[in-house]
Amino acid sequence: MKNLKGFMTAAAVAAAMLAFPAGAWAAQEVVVGGAISLTGRYSEPAGRLKDGRTLWVEEVNARGGLLGRKVRLVLRDDRSDPSTAVKLYERLLTQEKVDLCVAPYSSPITEATASITERYKCPIVADGAATRSIWGKGRKYIFGLVGPSDDYLRGAVEIAAKKGYKRIAIVNEDSLFSKAAANGAAMYAKKHGLQVVLKEEYPRTQTDFRPLLLKVKALNADALLGGSYFVDAAAITRQLKELNINLKIWAATVGPGLPRFTKDLGPLAEYVLGSTQWEPVPALGYPGIKEFIAKYAKRFGEKPNYHASQGYAAMLILEEAVKKAGKLDREALREQLTKLDMMTHYGRYKVGPDGFNSGKGLLLFQILKGERRLVWPEESQEVAPVVPLPAWDKRPTM
Amino acid sequence: MAERTPGWVYAVYLALALAGAGLPLALAWEGFVGWLAQARSMTSLAVTLQVLASGILQGGLYAVIAMGLTMIFGVMRIINVAHGEFLMVGAYMAFVFFMMLLPEELHSLFTSNLGMAILGVGVFLLICLPLMFLFGMGVQRLLLNPVVGGPELTPLLITFGLSLILINTFISVFSSDFRAIPYMSGALVVGNLALGYPQVISVAVSAAVTGGVFGFLKFSRLGKAVRATAQNADVAMVCGVNVERIYLYTFGFGTALAATGGVLISIQLAFSPEIGGIYILRSFAIIILGGRGNYLGALAGGILLGVIEGFISFFVSQGSQLQELAAYTLLVFMLLVRPQGLLGGIADE
């Protein structure tokens, strides 16, 4: 009995010690909160987004915080699942009462959570969503940053057209962003008079693409374009080799743009084309791009990819809006985000009447000697694309 | 007293029925037209052979997994819903061994050539199978033994609970990220056929394991006892078979077979703690197809399902979306038309 009493006293003291300082700080902290896919299918791009935001938080605190208050970033794991993300935002906005909201990663999850952030009138700069339809529903508290999904594969189509390749196969995950990317690719292909010989979707849970790829082979496609994320893009690349399928072009969204793609696939990643919003190439000429690349590389030991860059840019934009508003009031913040016109290392932020950052264009790179090199559009080109891709048996062995 | 149903209710029924029948028909028609157009532009002997070969390779893997399930069902009359999770555990064991325990300099040892790669899988299995065999015996002893012979629903619910526990445990340990083992890539090219090395290795190992299981059941004393228990546990017991021990071994074997499937998946595809569901569904379809408790049936059913899936996703437009549908449809169709399965089930004797 005595022991129990002692234990309970100790527990109470411990609890008080834990809770009290936290409570005392909370009054002064600015809590920036959101859900993000720390694990699951989307964890690779989402993780880079998180790194970009983390860098900003560290910097903003070093320069005295936001409105003189310390910033704390709260990112809860939605496990790449939209319904989990919805619950998390509901909790962050009602029980945990975050001051500012940050967006989740991926279009499907942003689409799901946008209704929640809209309901609680918490403005977000959607740094992980590229699908225009999210902005086509009259929402007032969501602001775009990145170029539209429809344009992701445009560069690959244009290269194919220029090279005179006629037969295009398009495959995509059956979710919001990937669908839009695939439909965009099909649209551009038609515009250039190319023939879409296959357009097929696969479920989110797919890991085995071999039957689908056999179809691509049998249809004699010149180019394969994938509306993909990381897991699927990596698996398709691997299985193309396994089935000895030689394509003139293999271009995919998201996956190849992540540092882990080249790390995991090694020589298999060579020559893969990928769409990107931004690359760590100072020649892009945006203000502060060089400094951002250096800071990020110092902090995380690798060059930032476009997701990392977006995560950081969104926070800079939010910071600017808060400064202009002079307070954390959400309506004032919304107003500032609506009219803000700002250049960052990432490019220009200036939303249209629908809240979409319509000026942003896409780029295309190719992985050459383990590095992503910009190949499209021509004005940003670092090197000419190596197409057709060399056949598997003509490449140096691993 | 029942009131007379007004006429408009029947009209609603009729409209719903028409809509219900019409929608699938319209979809089927569209699919059929698309199929005709696509099939005509793609079909050739070489391509058909490639699809067939890939289907058989895939089916071999399915067979190993389904065999474990059918063995457990045949002997114990337990539907092991956690079978897919046992498979997942096997895949993670291979992952831990390859990615965490094996020094990176030795990775290339397993990927340098076909012989070494097969040897590598052999090593995985030598480590993984005894552990999973013990794990299976533990599950049987601690969770299922108390309820064998009771209502059929109880073990089903227990294994269902176990599957959820395993999934969530693995999510908390390994996170729900997809993992992959950078195993040997590349293909064995024979004329127009390209057979991926991981799949070739997988089917070779499946064949060896399947052969081993058949030999064991057919010729060994213990194997005969297992078959006797499957046919009639009471009679087996009267003849001096220690039925409880047989249950223990059977569950161990079944679990090890699932884990074999897991190891073979880990060398060819990405996996996460939630992949079990994909394979348990197919395994159910396979054992219904082949005959419940029938080992040869599992082999035949597995290969058949692999081939059917291959052809569906190849020839039907949007076929990737329809693969799972194929398994479900086969399951229901077989239950209606030939419930004992193609080769007949032990359960129906």
Image (cartoon, coloured by chain):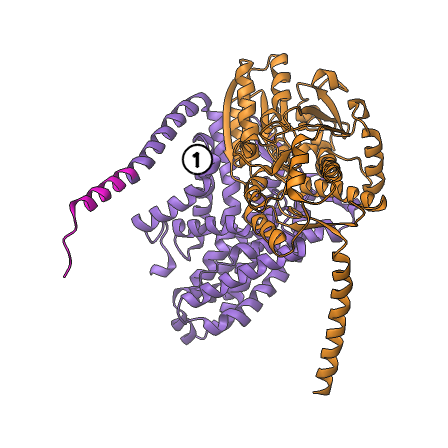
- In the image, residue A257 sits, relative to residue B287, either above or below, namely above
At x 33%, y 32%, the residue is B26
- The residue tagged with tag 1: helix, strand or loop? helix
- In the image, residue A34 sits, relative to residue A199, either above or below, namely below
Residue where numbered disc 1 is placed? B312
A118 to the left or right of A314: left
Q: Quadrant of residue A26?
A: bottom right
Q: Is residue B242 visible?
A: no
Q: Nearer the viewer, residue B63 or B39?
A: B39
Q: Quadrant of residue A354?
A: top right
Give percent across and percent down for residue A115: 54, 43
Instruction: Determine if the magenta segment contains residue B18.
Output: yes
Residue stretch rendered in magenta on the structure: B1-19
Q: Quadrant of residue A151?
A: top right
- In the image, residue B98 sits, relative to residue A319, either above or below, namely below
Task: Report the chain shown in purple.
Answer: B
Give percent across and percent down for residue B56: 49, 39
